[in-house]
Amino acid sequence: MNNPHVVIIGGGITGLVAAYRLHQLYASETEGAISCTLVEKEGRLGGKIQTKRTDAYTLEVGPDSIFTRKPAGVEFMKEIGLHDTMIPVSSQGGTLVWHQGKLHPLPPGIQTGVPSDLSAFAKTKLVSLQGKARALLEVLLPHVPYPDDVSVGEFLRKRLGNEIVDTLAAPLLSGIYAGDIDHLSLQATMPMLRELYEKNARLLLGAVRQRKRVSSVSRLSGPMFITLEHGLEQLVDHVVSQITEYTDVKVNTQALDIQLTSDGKYYIHIVEEGRESLVPADAIILATPAFDSAVLLGGLEIDVRKLKTIRYASTATVSFGYTRPSYAFSLVGSGFLVPRHEGMSITACTVVSNKWVHASKKGTLLIRCYVGRDGDEEAVTWDDEKLIRKVKEDLEKTTGLKDEPEFVHIKRWESSMPQYDVGHLQRLEQIDQEIAKLPGIFLAGAAYRGMGIPDCIQDATRVSQHVKNYLHE
Ligand code: FAD
């Protein structure tokens, strides 16, 4: 009998790590191996991970960092031998928030949007006296159990008031999901907040106690974010170099649909540089965005409506490089966030040369601005000229920077950020139940169990094990 053949659709980090894991799982098998094909519709691998390198800059146009508190990311890097190339985020200056015409430092202990360092919170100019009083009132509010999922916004607004949510929590969360805090699921995105609340009966008390408990540990456990010396594409290149020996990697190859014959065999209908063919598969991993997966599964006997309800937001990154900035750029932090109600085109800005000192030549300045978030995506559709003009206006207003950049790079990410809306986990269960009607087909990637790179790596690991279990049933 031939070795089972697994087809992975999608060559983003999820699909690539799935191919790597499958090989690992079978490398130790004494009998029977698998053959594996990975198809990617674009001409390059890595999906959202894209690094542009010039003589002066290493610029990420997609993700720029790996969150270390979710260990799957860093552990994987170490495992594949990238340990020596990991670069910690610069600890200088922290993050700022644009508020009423000025940039203010984000007070320490507010990472989840809930103040855990009350003396720092008392001093911040980001929240008015009334806003602070309203947040502190939380300790006097009765404990109300939340039986079902709610939005992070609803939960936090009820406990801490609107001001702190709109000024601090919403931009922080928007930075991760490009999301709307009043739609994002508490269970799926911030389950630790609910847990803090349930354990301590009050959110503020829980946050303060937790900070005290973990502060000494986190000081020891290193930087919260890392990148790689040559950018995150180094991760992609490294995984690719390790899988090509045993995986047939096809770029410029789009999967069009999946067909199931009466004898229970799957075929993937692909188009490879204009030529259509059918590729047989014993198991299939769909490591594609949910809307693409819904199309691929559309001809099979399952209900893909739930899959289609996973919404996506569009964003863009607009980056500027200044070789000899005449303006004495004084912003010391890694960048700043812009709350929705401030009415700007940019949602956030990273001063790349501060955040990742190695990423630009000494004396140059590299800045990356973001536009677009859930419900506020018009800027992504502007033409280049308008987009650059608007972003530059915002940059001048916030930082005073007027210089003409020598280097401009725009990357539009249409429908790129999956939104974990209220009810996401229940939706996921229903999707899993439907997919289970197609034995041998598995879904993985950013749309489901976490959208960060560490989550995608973990999901790829999970799904490869499922494939192996299935093939050995
Ligand atoms: P993708 O990277 O989307 O890969 C899916 C692949 O499937 C794509 O290459 C696509 O071309 C291919 N495909 C789709 N349909 C087909 C088909 N029919 N046939 C063949 N191929 C197909 N995460 C972090 O951890 N840190 C960050 O700093 C961070 N910042 C981000 C900033 C931006 C601007 C964006 C957009 C995302 C960011 N993320 C960040 C999120 C993270 O980058 C993504 O969630 C993750 O890379 C998604 O990986 P994936 O493999 O699941 O999907």
Image: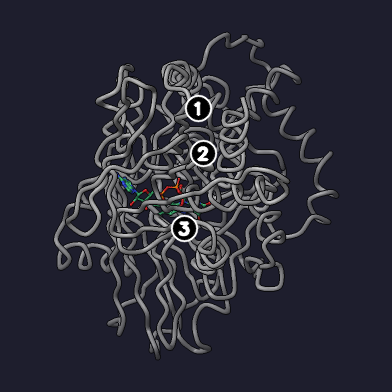
Count the marks.
3
From the viewer's perspective, tell me whether residue 277 is left or right of residue 50.
Answer: left
Mark number, residue 63: 3
Q: Which mark is residue 334?
A: none
> Mark 3 is on which residue type?
Pro
Point out residue 360 in the picture as x, y percentages from the top left corner: 49, 81
Nearer the N terminus, badge 3 or badge 2?
3
Q: Earlier in the sequence, mark 2 or mark 1?
A: 1
- The tag on residue 169 is 2
Res. 465 image quadrant: top right
Density class for disc 3 (Cα within 10 Å; few <14, some 14-19, many ≥20) is some
User: Which corner quadrant holds the C terminus?
Assistant: top right
Q: Is residue 181 left or right of residue 88?
A: left
Q: Name the residue nearer the viewer: 279 or 375.
A: 279
Residue 361: x, y in percent?
A: 50, 87
Distance from Cα at disc 3 to Cα at disc 1: 23 Å
**Amino acid on which disc 2 is placed:** Ala
Q: Which mark identifies residue 152?
A: 1
In front: label 2 or label 1:
1
Taking the image as shown, residue 260 lies to the left or right of residue 59, namely left
